[in-house]
Amino acid sequence: MKKLMQWLRRQKGQDLTEYALIIGLIVLLAIVALQTMGSSIQQILDKIATALGKAVT
């Protein structure tokens, strides 16, 4: 029984490490995507802000 509990504790630690690595990879990909598409996103947001500004006045 003691060996089973030790094995389960090791498995939980591995899962946590794997999740941390996956989250790190997702964050890295999001940063790269935002850097490459940042100007395009900014232009779209500027157009939306302009359209909303015209609609309000």
Image: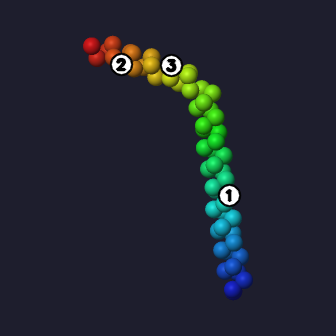
Mark 2 is on which residue type?
Leu
x then y, percent, for residue 17: 66, 60
Circle nearer the viewer, 2 or 3: 3
Residue that carries the numbered disc 2 in the rendered image: 52
First along the sequence among labels 1 and 2: 1
Q: Is residue 31 above or below residue 45?
A: below
- Quick check: 50 left or right of 38? left
Residue that carries the numbered disc 1 in the rendered image: 18
Mark 1 is on which residue type?
Glu
Residue 54's quadrant in the figure? top left
First along the sequence among labels 1 and 3: 1
x then y, percent, for residue 34: 58, 32
Front-most of residues 16 and 39: 39
x then y, percent, for residue 7: 71, 76
**Helix, strand or loop at mark 1:** helix
- Number of other residues with Cα within 10 Å of mark 3, as a class: few under 14, some 14 to 19, many 20 or more: few
Question: Do the CB atoms of the residues marked 1 and 2 lie less than 8 Å apart?
Answer: no
Give the alpha-carbon distance from disc 1 to disc 3, as whole Å: 37 Å
Give the alpha-carbon distance from disc 1 to disc 2, as whole Å: 44 Å
**Helix, strand or loop at mark 2:** helix
**Helix, strand or loop at mark 3:** helix
Mark 3 is on which residue type?
Gln
- Number of other residues with Cα within 10 Å of mark 2, as a class: few under 14, some 14 to 19, many 20 or more: few
Give the alpha-carbon distance from disc 2 to disc 3, as whole Å: 14 Å
Residue 6's disc number: none
Q: Quick one: which residue is furthest to the bottom in this view? A: 1
Q: Quadrant of the C terminus?
A: top left
x then y, percent, for residue 1: 69, 86
**Which residue occupies 46% across, 22% down?**
45
First along the sequence among labels 2 and 3: 3
Residue that carries the numbered disc 3 in the rendered image: 43
